[in-house]
Image: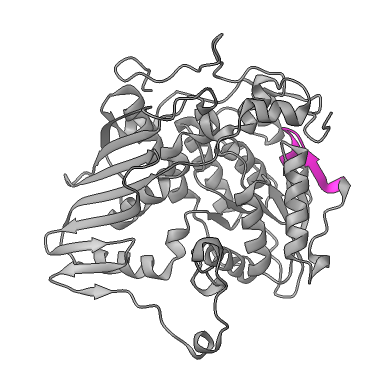
Amino acid sequence: MNKTLQPKSLVLTRRDFLKTTAIVGGSVAGALPVARFAHAAGGDTLKLALIGCGGRGSGAAAQALTADRGLKLVAMADAFEERLTKSLENLQAQMKDQPDRIDVPKERQFVGFDAHQKAIAAADVVILATPPGFRPIHFEAAVQAGKNIFMEKPVAVDAPGVRRVLAANEIAKQKNLKVGVGLQRHHDPGYVETVKRIQDGAIGDIVMLRAYWNGAGVWCRTRAELEKKLGRKPTEMEYQMYNWYYFVWLSGDHICEQHIHNLDVGCWVKGKYPVRAQGMGGRQVRTGLDHGEIFDHHFVEYEFDDGSRMMSQCRHIPGCWSSVSEHAHGTKGIAEISGKTIRGATEWKFQPPKSSADENAPAKVKKKGGRKSKSSADNPTQIEHDHLFAAIRANKPYNEADYGAKSSLVAILGRMCTYSGKQITWEEAMNSKLDLMPKTFAWDAEPPVKPDAEGRYPIAVPGKSVAL
């Protein structure tokens, strides 16, 4: 039997989670002690904890280590031991020339539903990269402990989670904690310049935005695969955690987990959030037993308070038109935001500045498929860590959690509309009582959704499913 995935005997209720973070209900204001974070001086060593050791978490840890030469990875946490072990091996290989910067002995490798608490306690800075459903819980715990934070998007999968993040972030601001969110387009020089020009009037008044994440889809982990790894039938909780992308309480559906990037850009350009939305979606192709409960396509029309609209598409169906992009239409022209180009009364295309360092730099290494890897200088997922750690070292205000939470709600609002078929306002979405999280966190606990006798999960039906 493969023992690497054997879960510990661990039962945590949601109340237990809240107790560990000194939070009751959805409000943290007044519950968390306010203390100023003792920032590290330029030459001091900073200790890093990685919570969530999948591909994105491992990548974020490597980028953090690149961003700050005084940073050392000292703790790791994941629900599955096998994932943690593989991540640690990969990071050690990447840092083989600086082995002392990966210092994660067995006693600081934490596995299970409470693993985040132990990892947070060991570090100065934490990376939160578990499935998004856990983000509010982990963010609250890190804020209470007074740690600087980088958290992946989305920061919640439901409105109660968004409210918890916003409330905890008020305490993070009082504590002067630095908080980064993985919406890296905000750190892409081309995006930053394009958005600035649009906001300065380069295309006139914006009348419509278009946002797309249409592609073939992502990975799918099967129940049979997990059973083979375990050498026994997995519990339902084990399976859903293993195949987390396909369950709403864990991922929020791909409109939240992925399309949030494009929706966030639209709201960034407008400088505001929509007042209402309506849309449609469903499951046309991705309907297997291991495809859980999420849709494979969504279309949402968002309306802003000035009457302008953002048309949103996201699709996970092979063989169809693919696009990951954002576009703005104005009274004086059109901006291909993702293409960093403006057409109309103003003609402009972003040109990355060249320096002598660029000219003397070695050629970029090609990846499989002929694509060139991005250097630190033009990779926004690296730049976001560079900016975060520069703020930590200089002890300058730095906090992205508010717009991270509100952009997460834009995606959640869209899912509410496509699942229910209803038109829903921003206020209705923000105040929604629909809580997707389990009542108990344990490997043998019941998750919020369960399969029928044939192994199929209940799917949202527009016109029938609960919106709020």
Is residue 217 shown above or below 60?
Answer: above
Q: What segment is highlighted magenta in the picture?
A: 107-116
Q: Position of residue 239 (x, y in %)?
A: 64, 26
What is the quadrant of residue 338 in the picture?
A: bottom left
Q: Nearer the viewer, residue 247 or 39?
A: 247
Q: Quadrant of the C terminus?
A: top left
Q: Position of residue 428 (x, y in %)?
A: 33, 29
Q: Nearer the viewer, residue 9 or 285?
A: 285
Q: Nearer the viewer, residue 369 or 444?
A: 369
Name the residue: 55% across, 56% down: 180
Q: Is residue 46 magenta?
A: no
Q: Quadrant of the N terminus?
A: top right
Extreme-top residue of the structure: 453
Is residue 391 shown above or below 268?
Answer: below
Question: How many dots with numbers?
Answer: 0
Q: Position of residue 454 (x, y in %)?
A: 54, 11
Q: Position of residue 143 (x, y in %)?
A: 63, 46
Name the residue: 26% across, 50% down: 210
Is residue 325 shown above or below 168?
Answer: below
Seen in the image, is 118 located left or right of residue 276?
right
What is the quadrant of residue 406 in the picture?
A: top left
Name the residue: 30% across, 57% down: 269
Seen in the image, is 72 located left or right of residue 311?
right
Asked whether residue 200 appears in the rendered view, the answer is: no
Seen in the image, is 6 located left or right of residue 456?
right
Name the residue: 49% across, 30% down: 160
Report the colour scheme. one colour
Asked whether residue 320 appears in the rendered view, the answer is: yes
